[in-house]
Image: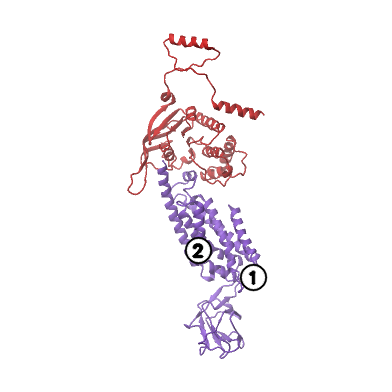
Chain colours: A red, B purple
Amino acid sequence: MGPVIAVEGLSVQFPTGFRKPPFQAVDGLDLEVAAGEIIGVLGPNGSGKTTLLRVLSGLLRPTSGAAHILGLDPCDRSLVTRVGYQPEGQLPLTNLSAAQFLAYLCDLMRLPPATARPASQQWLARLGLQDTGRKAIHHFSTGMRRRLALAAALVADPEVLLLDEPTSGLDPEGSLLVMEILRERSAGGCAVLLASHHLQEVEQMCDRVYLLQAGRVARSGSLDQLLGTGDTRLVLRGLDASGLAEVVAAAERAGGEVLSQSAEREHLFALFRAQERRSDAD
Amino acid sequence: MVAPVIATWLIGVVLVATTPVNQRLGADRSAGYWLHVPELLLVVAALAAMLDAWPPLSRARAGSDWLLRIRPGPLHASGWAAGGGLAALGLCLLASGVAFFVTEKAFGIDSGPVRRRVAFTALAARPYLAGSQTELHFATGARQPLADLELRPVEVFHPDVRTEEGTAQIRVLADGTPVHPGWLKCGSGSVELRLEPPRRVRTLAVQRRDRTGPALRLTADAVIGLDGEAHSGLANCLLAALSYLSLGLLAAGALLLGQKHLVLPVNLALGLMAVVLAAMLDVAPTNAAVAAFARGRWVLGEGVLLPAARMVAYGAALAGVGWLLGRSATARRRGNAQ
């Protein structure tokens, strides 16, 4: 089975003005995503992440090269429901409520109301927006807006997800929820391509990453390939100083080298979760 | 969207309501100018709301990618956009017409049945009843039967023109037949004459009895006929509103032209200023339409339709240019942002 997303030699130029050289946003980029994969696209601002997603969502035509999603041109009309796209930035029509916004998008996508309505309700509930009622989107917090944006990308049950900064503006709990949903979708065979600045989340979630620099792929591969050092990390518990010294001596006798030794600690996120659980219990 | 529009209109209504009655119904008992206030505010508010809430017209706004992806292309779904636009304009027109109707009823400026005006043109180069010129002739090409005639002469006091004591006396003949028995006393102001039975009139003759009162001048629109058919008051409200809508559309076009380069408050302020100036300079036929409406004339018979259509065309052209410029400006900006 071929890749769900296939990009070959993709280049995108933007005009910058009369008699000025065009801006090269993406330059000869190759990329492949298989069904069920979560792929992260990383890079500094202006490296071409959003342009890549806009080409794949059919919003931009490449200057040269080719891009295919599910074997079709990204501008193919049938992909509107088969590909879920969450653009960066704000939502439109912020005078609508969350349910009205989803209903409007479903209507534009010509989804049958019999499936669109339950799907909207399901995703609103899953993303914690079921109680927003008639509250207009412009009264939502940033996190609520991002969660609604994800619901809008998911409402048509797409086979491919293109997400631009999906966890931007979310609290740790919201980020965790988004990661959980993306893993579920991936397990169900959905291909996910996400652009993000949140390196830790990309590291936790993605099977492979593409690191972009000035519109080109600087590095790509699985996280093990990119980050693996060949060193082994050993975490010990219940040893005093003399016991620890013995372990270090044993390692050196066996030909190894102890590179670092420090007290282990939890991530800040675990502390945050524990505090939230405590608040819920109270 | 609806609430701010209604609130703005209510502000206009309150403005009119709190104005003393003698100011509202000035010396000539014409309340027409005060009708401008709520209508102006209503149309501006409705158009601002339309600009804010109608995505196809504002493709560069925040979040437009969501909609562009589903309805892409420069002309794709323009049918939908046009349909939405027409629906929005229809709503503005309806709201505007209802506002006229309510304002008219609320402030007692109901001027009776709505009737079409037929203008008579003076055949003389100088339409004076003075000195040896004791008779003036007027003609019309209108074919409908007339039920009433209305004369609005102006008394002329000039050192070169002989002035007699007392009030001028006149006689009106329609197609050579006297409309009334004897002579009528007539100064500055209006004279209304009933034609019994209503009939088609081609020519009118106005005679001044020699040596009576000051000279009279019958300027353009000083001699008119009114047809016998009563037209719908609500339809007249909608037609009067149409003139304002055309002005509003011109402003909407200007707003669209500026929306890529100006922040919304500045753009709206400039748009509002353009509307007020256009109304003051009589660029759009608002004054003629509102004046006719306030006098109970059928607005369609006032020649406002063509200027209104012209305003709509200008507005649509401006909107089209603004839309196209906006698209290319957006593409450039997005390109630079990458």
* Quadrant hosting residue A253: top left
Q: Which residue is mark 1?
A: B22
Q: Position of residue B293 (x, y in %)?
A: 58, 69
Residue B285, percent from left and from top: 51, 67
Q: What residue lies at 39% left-to-right and 37% top-to-bottom?
A: A67
Disc 1, SS: helix
User: Against A240, is A25 above or below?
Assistant: below
Question: Mark 2 highlights which residue?
Answer: B277
- Furthest residue in direction front, as rendered: A241
- Comparing A270 with A72, the one in front is A270
Regarding residue B83, the answer to whether it shows in the image is no
Secondary element type, mark 2: helix
Q: Residue at x 61, y 74 (%)?
A: B27
The amino acid type of the residue labelled 1 equals Asn
**Front-most of residues A218 and A3:** A218
Are tags 2 and 1 found on a single chain?
yes
